[in-house]
Image (spheres, rainbow, N blue to C red):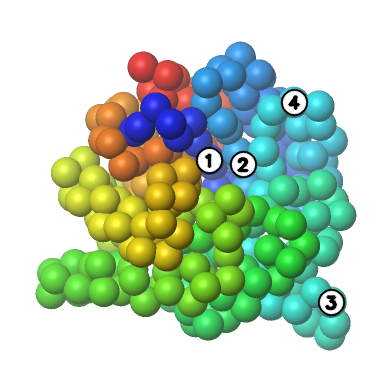
Amino acid sequence: MTTQRKPLIAGNWKMNLSGSEASALTDACAREASTNPNVDVAIAPPAIWLERVLRIAKDTPLHVWGQNAAEEPNGAFTGETSFPMLLDAGASGALLGHSERRHVFGESNESVAKRAALGVSLQAHIVLCVGEQLDDRKSGKTIDVVREQLAPVLEVVPFERLTVAYEPVWAIGTGETATPAQAQETHAQIREILIETYGEDAQCVRILYGGSVKPDNAQELLSQPDIDGVLVGGASLTADSFAAIIAAATV
């Protein structure tokens, strides 16, 4: 983790937590963000709890993102949440291209890029998730897959509005984690792709690692030069474990 990029610890709550649990966890995350000024802290709650979460996070350093955003700004799209809605509620950006959206809901690279372009037009921050499946890893296609996922988004998102989250699909929620060396290798390759697009401005773009991040492996991952933070799933659902990961970023 280079000193010119402030570490970012982000929690993706996915489809979890009751309203009261979301409130309590937001309060804890806001305290952590306030007491750790050298680390940026972000959470992505379920859309139904966004307004509740944002009320608690107001006037604190805690960043709040949507878990996804629709391709269109409005219209007859039952069940979707748009960028204008997210931003009006107070969110600063959204995760796009999470593996569950790609592989469970069938979102394509082109669809992700369309969402990103809309978000950028409204001054939203884009947190682009990329990553390979196990077969891709075994056949040596990791960076080819990641490049295909990055390419259409990099065409429409300026560097100052982008965070990349590398999440090997085979490590999400499985208990398996890419070794720090494996993660660093892919992060360094992603950095090179960013440099191809943005030049040296790419050094400002934070690249997060996601995939079964826990308090006991966070520090070693965060010690790698191109791992600028982590996107945490299950371990972000309890205040103690998420606080321990934030603490690992301060070492």
Mark pair 3, 4: CA separation: 30 Å
Estimate the x, y position of residue 194 in percent, counting from the top left. 39, 59
Drawn side of residue 111 relative to residue 109, left or right: right
Lower sequence index among marks 2 and 3: 2
| Disc 3 element | loop
Picture residue at 79% right of the left edge, 39% below the top = 54
Picture residue at 49% right of the left edge, 68% below the top = 154
Picture residue at 42% right of the left edge, 65% below the top = 197
Q: Are marks 2 and 1 in contact (CB under 8 Å)?
A: yes
Lower sequence index among marks 2 and 1: 1
The answer to whether residue 163 is seen in the rendering is yes
Would you name the residue on which mark 3 appears?
74
In the rendering, which numbered label is found on residue 64?
A: none
Residue in the foreground of this view, choosing between 229 and 23:
229
| Disc 1 element | strand
Would you name the residue on which mark 4 appears?
60
Would you name the residue on which mark 2 appears?
43
Question: Quadrant of the image for the N terminus?
Answer: top left
**Which numbered disc, 4 or 2, marks the residue closer to the eye?**
4
Picture residue at 41% right of the left edge, 56% below the top = 199
